[in-house]
Image (cartoon, grey):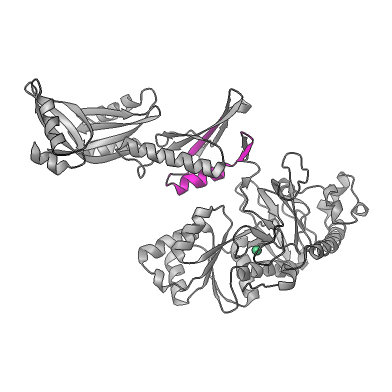
């Protein structure tokens, strides 16, 4: 399933991440997933939320630099070898994974994973 | 073939120029001594009499004039003619304090117009051309200077003044303007507007004269490509007369100074000592035949280099390279002169906003330069690798411009400290 992910520029200094989660919490936006990619100086916080327009509004209003991009959310069976199987199919289809991370959203028997890939249509097709 | 407005003067052998300058300088000093009480008082205070000035070689004995001197004696500073003989004033913008008022007699206007006519001809203009003057008119010298120069040359002159881009483009197209004179930033804006409207093929422009602002070589190439012209630089200050103190020729490697009207020196900004040709330092001008508002050894605060190297255009006037920045702003880092304006130019070229902060420090007896740059929504991407590449590109461009390594830090928008709405641009921890 394709969903909209919000990426926020993060300066690597104390309390920056909390500032962002605080802006969202105050607006009543629910975080479904969060991931950080960083260098020593700066990073990118990637989030999935329940209300994308509201989240972008409050983040931009607070002076954040953001970008909104499509990512794929894939349900992976929460059993031994489940992720291995999915990654195997992706490799076989020659799909390149730019990054992936897990959500806090999911039930006992499935884990929901976020994928950023070079060929999103094919990923949807094979899984 | 190269054209000249005043061929004999512009291509005069160097020794003859010096002779002419010497003769005019002595006359100018006599005029100042007799008719300019402000400067005479400065000379007397420095213990110098007109009898001590026997030739141009004695110019080093004379005191400098600074912008503060001109402000202090507002509104008649350095006035050397009765007001009844003056026909016009111009004035500086006064953004950094009291305005400076420059007075002109008809002779002074004629002299200035001649300088601008030379600049137009050096840019390839003739009386057949249609010259669009899109500098501001009024107290600002930009519009009046190029307008006067174009009149003198006999070209059809469009006194457009600045702004109202629709009307600018309409006249440019309908009247077939061939030469445009404006600030480089407005030229870049016009080029954008022309591209948006898709009217480039309706233009007859061939040359542009752009000054009154700092601009880079990259910006020159962009304007040239965008307008389909050759872009020429021009230099001048209201305190000296206006645009046309120096002007660029077809070689585009610096601006020829109108040496029959202005004598240029390069000094060490700290000691005031005159530096040999080819050294970088502060540019100082002395007028040689102005009546109402003569300036003797005026410190421009512009840092640049003078060169007598033979020019392919055939002009023998000394050339000044584009000023690198202002002496007030100059930082010396690892022995290299660095100007915030250079860093700003690189940032704008690379698509960042001019919101930056320089932090200079000394670590293990070696200077360091850190540049904080605000991330912009336009530059931001979800890809960390792309951001790292952008950063690397910026480091490379800064190195190419400054000649030293600067560490770049991308910071959150609006995070750079502001005092009274203005960003604190430079933090020099070496002085703390
Ligand atoms: Zn030349």
Q: Quadrant of residue B352?
A: top left
Q: Tell me if residue B402 can be seen.
A: yes
Kindly identify the residue that appears in the image at 47 percent across and 74 percent down: B204
User: Residue B117 lies in magenta, yes or no?
Assistant: no
Choose between A56 and B327: the one closer to the eye: B327
Quarter the N terminus of chain B occupies: bottom right
In x, y percent, where is residue B274? 78, 46
Magenta span includes B346: yes
Q: Position of residue B139 (x, y in %)?
A: 62, 60
Q: Where is A109 relative to B261, above or below?
A: above
Q: At which x and y percent is residue B177?
A: 50, 73
Residue for point 18% across, 42% down:
A119
**In front here: B147 or A8?**
A8
In this view of the protein, can residue B355 be seen by the observer? no
Position of residue B110 in the picture relative to residue B431 (left or right): right
Q: Which residues are magenta?
A: B334-360
- Find the residue positioned furthest to the front: A92
- Measured from the top left, where is residue B206 in percent x and y? 51, 70
């Amino acid at each position: 399933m394709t969903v909209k992910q919000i990426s926020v520029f993060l300066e690597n200094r104390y309390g920056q991440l909390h500032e962002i989660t605080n802006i969202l919490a105050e607006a009543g936006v629910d975080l479904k997933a969060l991931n950080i990619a960083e260098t020593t100086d700066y990073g990118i916080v990637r989030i999935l939320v329940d209300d994308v327009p509201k989240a972008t509004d409050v983040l931009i209003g607070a002076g954040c630099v953001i970008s909104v991009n499509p990512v794929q959310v894939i349900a992976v069976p929460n059993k031994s070898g489940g992720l291995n199987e999915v990654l195997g199919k992706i490799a076989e289809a020659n799909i390149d994974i730019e990054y992936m991370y897990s959500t806090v959203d999911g039930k006992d028997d499935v884990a929901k994973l976020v994928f950023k890939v070079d060929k999103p249509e094919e990923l949807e097709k094979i899984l | 073939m190269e054209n000249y407005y005043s061929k004999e003067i512009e291509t005069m052998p160097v020794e003859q120029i010096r002779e002419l300058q010497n003769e005019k300088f002595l006359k100018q000093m006599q005029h100042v001594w007799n008719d300019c009480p402000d400067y005479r008082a400065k000379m007397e205070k420095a213990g110098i009499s007109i009898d001590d000035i026997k030739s141009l070689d004695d110019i080093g004995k004379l005191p400098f004039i600074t912008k503060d001197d001109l402000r202090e004696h507002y509104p008649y500073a350095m006035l050397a003619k009765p007001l009844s003989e003056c026909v016009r004033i111009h004035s500086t913008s006064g953004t950094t304090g009291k305005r400076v008022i420059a007075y002109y007699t008809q002779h002074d206007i004629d002299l200035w117009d001649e300088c601008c006519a030379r600049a137009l001809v050096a840019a390839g203009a003739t009386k057949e051309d249609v010259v669009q003057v899109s500098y501001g008119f009024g107290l600002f010298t930009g519009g009046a200077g190029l307008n006067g120069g174009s009149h003198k040359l006999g070209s059809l002159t469009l006194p457009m003044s600045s702004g109202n881009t629709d009307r600018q483009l309409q006249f440019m197209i309908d009247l077939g303007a061939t030469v445009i004179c404006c600030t480089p930033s407005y030229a870049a804006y016009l080029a954008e507007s022309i591209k948006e409207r898709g009217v480039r093929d309706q233009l007859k422009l061939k040359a542009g004269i752009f000054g009154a602002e700092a601009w880079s070589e990259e910006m020159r190439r962009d304007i040239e490509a965008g307008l389909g012209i050759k872009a020429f630089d021009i230099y001048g200050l209201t305190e000296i007369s206006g645009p046309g103190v120096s002007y660029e020729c077809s070689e585009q490697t610096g601006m020829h100074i109108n040496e029959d009207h202005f004598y240029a020196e390069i000094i060490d900004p700290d000691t005031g000592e005159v530096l040999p040709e080819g050294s970088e330092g502060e540019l100082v001008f002395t007028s040689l035949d102005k009546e109402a508002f003569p300036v003797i050894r005026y410190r421009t605060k512009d840092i640049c280099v003078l060169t007598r190297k033979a020019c392919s255009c055939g002009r023998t006037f000394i050339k000044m390279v584009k000023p690198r920045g202002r002496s007030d702003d100059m930082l010396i880092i690892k022995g290299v002169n660095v100007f915030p304006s250079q860093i700003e130019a690189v940032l704008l070229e690379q698509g960042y906003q001019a919101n930056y902060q320089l932090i200079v420090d000394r670590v293990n007896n070696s200077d360091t330069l850190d540049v904080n740059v605000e991330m912009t929504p336009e530059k931001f991407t979800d890809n960390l690798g792309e951001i790292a590449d952008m950063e690397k590109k910026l480091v490379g461009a800064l190195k190419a411009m400054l000649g030293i390594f600067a560490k770049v830090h991308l910071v959150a928008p609006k995070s750079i400290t502001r005092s009274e709405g203005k960003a604190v641009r430079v933090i020099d921890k070496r002085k703390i």
